[in-house]
Image: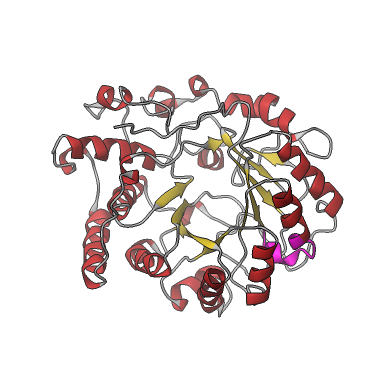
Amino acid sequence: MKLVRQLNYDLNKRPFMVIWETTQACDLACKHCRAESQPEHHPNALTTSQAKSLINQLNDFGKPHPILVLTGGDPFKRDDIFELTKYATDLGLPVALSPSGTPLLTTENLQRVRQSGCKAISLSLDGSNAVIHDEFRGVPGSFDWTVNGWKQAQQAGLKIQINTTVTKDNLFDLPEIFRLVHEIGAMTWSLFFLVPTGRAKQEDEISPLAYESVMHFLYDASKFISLKTTEGHHYKRVVLQRSLLEEKGLDWLPYFEVDEVYARLSAHLQQVVLENQIRRRMDDRIRRTPLHINAAEGFVFVSLLGEVFPSGYLPMSAGNITQTSLMDIYQHSDLFVSLRNKKALQGRCGICEYNTVCGGSRSRAYAVTGDVLAEEPFCSYQPGSFPFDHKIFDNELAV
């Protein structure tokens, strides 16, 4: 069994995914907003011409092309978003869009996106009902706009990813969001683990032990739906460890420390599965880790001003695409090169046997400690404490 998913090209040379912050303009007021969104478009944001130059720079990486995700703010606040989507897809770039749950999430806009060549969108659901979600998003009606949006997106032929940011406010609603994701028929549930940057505050984080409990809940949920994590890289470790214990026929609980958070989430998940007659997935994809990409390692974020960051949650610029090519920044900037060097990681991350498939959240390390190479502050795992690692890494081959 090949447990570790890797790409067949060098992530030192080319990214797997590029996120472009098309605008900060958005009609929501989300509590955790990384972009600290504003009602109006920034006057110095990349122009249409500069945006096409960015797309050309992505094309320069060659095939397989990086995935381009158009995010914001709300990309529907840009008048040229359909033109830019078509420009990218005409070059052969795979394009996804991440619009906000606002009145702009209309049938017309979604159909135009599909006609422009986009095949997938991601929508945020931070609660299973309007009370929780709208409080999170800061605008009444966002939940209904989002639900209507995914229905219209499906009719338009778009694939849907559902994004959920995990905080203290919605922690115990996760099984109900799982139910809704299954009902939607989303291709992926992507869970974002809070990074205290932008409007997000560290006091909104759950504890490191609760993080571990949520990771195990997600492993259980992955039996039924496809899911991944963002800024929760230690989920990959949990997948590896739990998969191996399953193959050995061993009960996993004695090997991990989880708290009452897992017990509550697990019981609720079982209830949802039974009540909705949700069937287990028949393939073996749950038995391999989500694809290993991390800040500057397969992943790059370009701001609305053209600044290049390792991640949208890591506000350290390595250059600007209007002055230096994205390829040069990605391959050669000191910041990006240092983040790809696992030997430079400090603390537990530096000695952890999983740092080549995890590496911790560099964004959270920077936000909490001010040091981008510090250990992941919200991981409770003690390196070397799991007794079967050699069995896992004997199977670490490219796929």
Q: Position of residue 263 (x, y in %)?
A: 22, 57
**Where the C terminus falls, by quadrant?**
top left
Residue range (magenta): 72-82
Q: Is residue 374 above or below residue 231?
A: above
The front one of 381 and 229 is 229
The answer to whether residue 27 is seen in the rendering is no
Q: Is residue 262 left or right of residue 28?
A: left
The front one of 214 and 390 is 390
The structure residue drawn at horizontal position 55% and vertical position 42%, both measured from the top left corner, is: 367
Q: Position of residue 79 (x, y in %)?
A: 79, 65
Q: Is residue 321 left or right of residue 68?
A: right
Q: Position of residue 247 (x, y in %)?
A: 19, 36
Q: Tell whether position 384 is magenta.
A: no
Total marks in image: 0
The answer to whether residue 95 is seen in the rendering is yes
Q: Position of residue 314 (x, y in %)?
A: 61, 42
Q: Tell whether position 76 is magenta.
A: yes
- Tell me the quarter of the picture where residue 14 sits: top right
Q: Is residue 33 above or below residue 373?
A: below
> What sort of colour scheme is used for the picture?
secondary structure
The structure residue drawn at horizontal position 39% and vertical position 22%, both measured from the top left corner, is: 351
Q: Is residue 371 left or right of residue 381?
A: right
Q: Is residue 58 left or right of residue 366?
A: right
The structure residue drawn at horizontal position 56% and vertical position 63%, both measured from the top left corner, is: 158
The front one of 398 and 275 is 398
**Where the N terminus falls, by quadrant?**
top left
The front one of 231 and 56 is 56
